[in-house]
Image: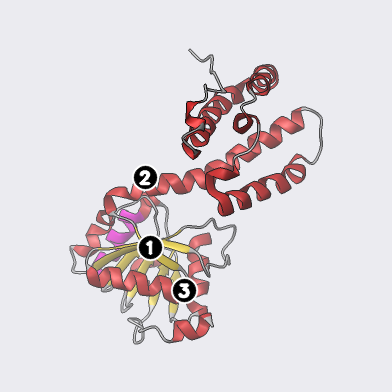
Amino acid sequence: MRELERESLPSPLSATSLVVVGRGRVGGSLARAAELAGIEVRVTSADRAAEAAKGAGAALLCVPDEAIGEVCARIAPFSPPLVGHVSGATQLDALSPATENGARAFSLHPLQTFADESAPVDGTPAAIAGSDEAALSFARWLAEALGMRPFEVPEESRAAYHAAAAISSNLLVALEESAAQLVERLGIEDARELLTPLVLRTAANWAERGPAALTGPIARGDRATVERHRAVLAETAPELVPIYDALAERAEAVMRGGSAGEAEKPPVHRSVRA
């Protein structure tokens, strides 16, 4: 069914090609998805981007944020009609070298983590933006052609949007690794394997129930257990105490926001930070 839906889409690239600049995990995965969608695609490295961009219908820069402007400047003299990037936090003005040469600018940020160069993107939400309606329409078409679900993010909100993505993915890994290291300090082996079912079930519960998925001592109002947590962390892993305090405070805010009745309860967690 997905393939039939893609075939029915109008194709701005029917007579030209898409150049993906960047051979990393995101670039490789999007190029693979483009091939599966029947789009003529070329993949090139940043240092050969100018040559590859000649005669292309669109260029998609899958390079680190700090390199977007530099790579865009390289291809600007040979700029395709459409030039885009896949950064979540970067605004379209990073593509100004291309737009000053008459190109339209767009962005397409897959809201997903990529483990390798062949990660599937089918069903992945994608934040899109465009310098004008035509560019935005192209970004939406490309996202849908690759099997993704496009949604718009205002330019002025890009950094905040990307911060939310980082919290839900990158920082989640750091948090779970902190928990695993704490378990390992207790002499328990296979910490990640032991914690994985809990992590996955919690994520599934949150996806299904939102803030109502919150469980544990703070949700129960068990202040004594929270204080025991803080005491043992101060002895065993003192570097985790500020993290625990910040997350405990946030968990209380989530709990109180769940219903008016709970908002009247006294705080369960009382940080002793100066």
Of the numbered discs in the image, which one, if any, rests on residue 146? 3
Q: Is residue 121 above or below residue 206?
A: below
Residue with the most extreme front position: 261
Residue type highlighted by circle 3? Leu
Asked if disc 2 and disc 3 are in contact, CB closer than 8 Å, the reply is no
Verify whether residue 172 appears in magenta: no
Q: Position of residue 91 (x, y in %)?
A: 30, 53
Q: Nearer the viewer, residue 107 or 161?
A: 161
Note whether 247 is above or below 74 in the view shown. above
Disc 1 packing (10 Å; few <14; some 14–19; many ≥20): some
Residue 220 drawn at (x, y percent)? 63, 31
Q: Which mark is residue 151?
A: 1
- Measuring 39% from the left and 53% from the top, which residue is drawn there? 88
Q: Which mark is residue 160?
A: 2
Q: In the image, 98: left or right of 38?
A: left
| Residue that appears at 52% across and 46% down | 168
- The amino acid type of the residue labelled 2 equals Ala
Residue 139 picture location, percent across and down: 34, 69
The residue carrying pointer 3 sits among few (fewer than 14), some (14 to 19) or many (20 or more) residues within 10 Å by Cα, namely many
In this rendered view, identify the residue nearer to me: 40 or 9.
Answer: 9
Which residues fall within the magenta stretch?
Answer: 68-77
Q: Is residue 76 magenta?
A: yes
Q: Quadrant of residue 199?
A: top right
- Label 2 or label 3, whichever lies nearer to me, is 2
